[in-house]
Amino acid sequence: MTSQFDPTLASTSSPQKQNQMLQWLFCVALVYMVLLAVGFIGSGFKSATGVHAKELFEFASNPFLGLLIGTICTALIQSSSTVTSIIVGLVAGGLPVATAIPMIMGANIGTTITNTLVSLGHVRDKEEFRRAFSAATVHDFFNVMGVLIFLPLEIAFGMLEKLSGMLSNLLVGGDSLSLKSLNFIKPITKPIISNVADGLAVISSASWVPGVVMILLGIGIIFFAITMIGKTLKQLMVGRAKNILHTAIGRGPVSGISSGTVVTVLVQSSSTTTSLVVPLVGSGIFKMKEIYPFTLGANIGTCITALLASTAVSGEFAVFALQVALVHLLYNVFAVVLIYGIPFLRNIPPTMAERLAGVAAERKTIALLYVVLLFFVFPATMIFFS
Amino acid sequence: MSEIKSDQLIALENRIEEVKNLLHELEESARQLREQEQHQEVNHLEDYLNETDKEVQALAVFKDEVVKEIKGLIERIKDKMHSPGSH
């Protein structure tokens, strides 16, 4: 067989290279904007709430409510990276880690809406739709299952909170392995964040006004920058993503999970990775069970954004910002190891997805009800009754 | 009698082995062919990546199908209500 690697990578002409260089510079600038934005949210939240951050989020201390807030927010803006980065910023401003953990879990569920919506586009051919819808919903079922297992465990034992706390202390706390001195991001973000905070302080004598403005500015910048990063990296990384996928074809599930992780890190969006496989399965070239590990890798790969965001945070809550980013990573790694590692559990999401897709292919209204109920009506009802 | 039966058995076992080998070869060929097709599809990854931004179009197409399905359901209910046997 001839080499499957993309030859265009080796023969890029000079103007193309120049264009790529510009795109890379643009990406670096966007990443810097994300880091600044997380700092804005943290700093704004701190100045808006003072020492009352905990009381302000008292309503979300019910973990189920936190979970549903995370789900709805992510489903609405269709980006778990944006939501988790905002959560990191809020924790940097004083939001308790225990309150943020269910929100992070909710973001995992909310992000699955994108590939489910993409799968709806295959509706005109019944068989194609059945395959595409099952490829999309296998991710939904896996993430819902992850929450069903880990949220009760977290409520009962605080396992993720304790483990991430230990790790974050080890990395940036007072312990000997501290990486504080290696963090080069804070020095390049802190002066600008402080200047903006000082500049906004003149707009009102009430401390909460500039704080709220900073939070809104931060959320807006994160939303814009993460969307643009995703679009730019998609173009820049397509060649590498191809090579990774070529390498993963015909290999085992570990290779599938690894390639899903790497491709998601490259394109900085789990929605892109999981939506990418929908038409591949829909066309019948790939089987749903072949892409299932790849989809799980996307859950792990997407954690890079929150980890990166946490490096921009300074001050007394910096350790908690890293802690919540580590919770995101640990939760996704544990979910993959536990659910995919145990054969009985491993088979539940694909079986459920195949059954639902079979029914939805016959009655499209079922697919519509599934999306509306799972992502909006059920969470909204739960919030209302909480 | 037992000798004849044994020969038949040996022949059958040989045949089973042959079929098993053939099945294995067919499975291997199918796997190779599927992987080849998968590699070809991955070569068109750009097209699939563009598809990932089409949620709005996907929803529009889906809406048409759902509306068609609901209209069909309403028609069936109407027909049933107006059929001679209905009350």
Image (tube, coloured by chain):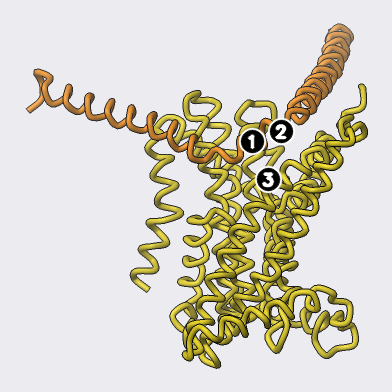
Chain colours: A yellow, B orange
Which residue is drawn at the image coordinates 47% and 25% (left, top)?
A124
Indicate which disc residue B50 carries: 1
Report whether mark 1 lies on the same chain as mark 3. Answer: no
Q: Secondary structure at mark 2?
A: helix
Q: Secondary structure at mark 3?
A: helix
Disc 3 crowd, CA 10 A, few/some/many (<14, 14-19, 20+): many
Contact (Cβ within 8 Å) of mark 2 with mark 1: yes
Is any part of residue A163 visible from this angle? no
- Give the residue at mark 3: A273
Direction from residue A266 to residue A159 in the image, left or right: left
Front tag of 2 and 3: 2
Which residue is drawn at the image coordinates 87% and 29% (left, top)?
A4
Look at label 1 and name its amino acid.
Asn
Report whether mark 2 lies on the same chain as mark 1. Answer: yes
Separation of residues labelled 2 and 3 (CA atoms): 12 Å
Look at label 2 and name its amino acid.
Glu
